[in-house]
């Protein structure tokens, strides 16, 4: 048990350490590709950090030999957006609160493009409503509808790149960590650091999940509880670490773009895989997860569309995840 707990802590540290390199590399990669800061967070960073859990979903729904294994893939496709919509946004709010003086902020207001984030939340909510509705009904051509989710993500990426804000492209960046003496690192070096850090993030995240499951088994927790409550938090840890790092640097725009982009991936690509290869039929637990996620997104959409967001309001959205945990504990 001591070894398991030690590996658990080491893997968490490795995720944070590699995320430091990842966010640094992805910013330089975006600079060299002439992408705006928002597109860097919502497309490049989100795709990179969401790739490991998307692979997990793919393996579960495509190669799973039992209904239980396939259900784990569906659970991952539903659990990820719930964690991002509640805990990830709460982390942004908490980190800003604790770093307000260091960042020399005179208020608790977020410095972001509120209209853009509100639009992303509205788009995500519309897609997610369809995603949940499909889990309630059964019909013969349902698998073909998975194509629409892939198309929705392609349109999202095209729109993010097309509307990218390049006004801050020349803002000062920290030196590339693998060659700090180079003032203007090449695209190849930025790619190298980003890919290497992403590999470490993937490996460390996998170890984190393994050790978390081992701890749960040692504590005699039910496997379903681990799949529904703990595994989604573990797999979304890179996004939350990225948010923590960027917010500490005063770049909440990048942090929130990363979360929005990851949520859009979770709403489309894993969902498409689940619809392609499983009946995509929800039980009470999955439906509860979907409803609470929609409530969280509706709350976020409402506060961002006002144009002024107090970071303390983001902390309150985590209460919805606490409600979900309480309902799961009661259910089991």
Image (cartoon, rainbow, N blue to C red):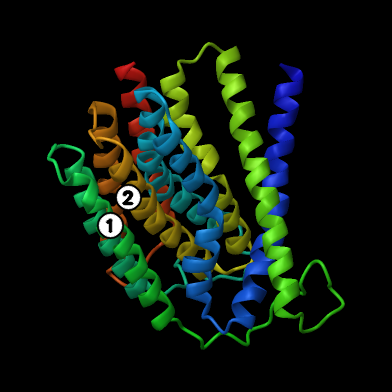
Residue named by callout 1:
147
Residue in the foreground of this view, choosing between 94 and 51:
51
Residue in the foreground of this view, choosing between 244 and 3:
3
Q: Earlier in the sequence, mark 1 or mark 2?
A: 1
Q: Position of residue 140 (x, y in %)?
A: 14, 41
Whether residue 312 is situated above or below residue 226 in the rendered picture: below
Residue named by callout 2:
272
> Does dot 1 land on a helix, a strand or a loop?
helix
Q: Is residue 308 visible?
A: no
Q: Position of residue 57 (x, y in %)?
A: 44, 41
- Quadrant holding the C terminus: top left
Mark 1 → mark 2, Cα distance in angstroms: 7 Å
Q: Is residue 57 visible?
A: yes
| Contact (Cβ within 8 Å) of mark 1 with mark 2 | yes
| Quarter of the rendering containing residue 96 | bottom right
Q: Residues within 10 Å of mark 1 (few under 14, many from 20)?
A: some
Q: Position of residue 312 (x, y in %)?
A: 43, 55
Q: Is residue 223 left or right of residue 4?
A: left
| Quarter of the rendering containing residue 261 | bottom left
């Amino acid at each position: 048990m001591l070894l398991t707990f030690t590996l658990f802590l080491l893997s968490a540290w490795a995720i944070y350490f590699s995320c430091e390199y990842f966010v640094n590399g992805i910013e330089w990669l975006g600079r060299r590709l002439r992408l705006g800061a928002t597109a860097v967070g919502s497309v490049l960073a989100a795709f990179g950090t969401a790739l490991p859990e998307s692979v997990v979903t793919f393996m579960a729904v495509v190669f799973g030999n039992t209904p239980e294994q396939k259900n784990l893939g569906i659970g991952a496709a539903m659990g990820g957006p719930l964690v991002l919509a509640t805990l990830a946004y709460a982390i942004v709010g908490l980190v800003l609160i604790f770093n307000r003086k260091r960042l020399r902020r005179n208020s608790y207001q977020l410095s972001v493009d509120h209209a853009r984030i509100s639009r992303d939340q509205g788009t995500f909510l519309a897609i997610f409503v369809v995603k949940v509705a499909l889990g309630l009904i059964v019909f013969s051509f349902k698998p073909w509808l998975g194509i629409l989710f892939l198309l929705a993500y392609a349109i999202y990426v095209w729109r993010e790149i097309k509307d990218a804000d390049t006004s801050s492209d020349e803002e000062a960046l920290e030196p590339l960590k693998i060659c700090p003496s180079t003032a203007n690192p090449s695209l190849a070096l930025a790619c190298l650091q980003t890919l290497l850090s992403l590999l470490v993030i993937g490996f460390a995240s996998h170890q984190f999940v393994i050790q978390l499951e081992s701890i749960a088994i040692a504590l005699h927790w039910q496997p379903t509880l681990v799949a529904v409550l703990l595994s989604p938090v573990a797999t979304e840890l890179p996004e939350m670490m990225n948010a923590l790092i960027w917010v500490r640097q005063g770049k909440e725009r990048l942090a929130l773009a990363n979360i929005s982009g990851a949520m859009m991936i979770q709403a489309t690509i894993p969902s498409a895989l689940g619809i392609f290869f499983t009946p995509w039929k929800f039980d009470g637990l999955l439906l509860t997860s979907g409803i609470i996620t929609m409530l969280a997104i509706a709350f976020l959409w409402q506060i961002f569309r006002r144009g002024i967001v107090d970071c303390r309001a983001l902390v309150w959205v985590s209460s919805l995840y606490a409600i979900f945990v309480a309902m799961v504990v009661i259910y089991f």
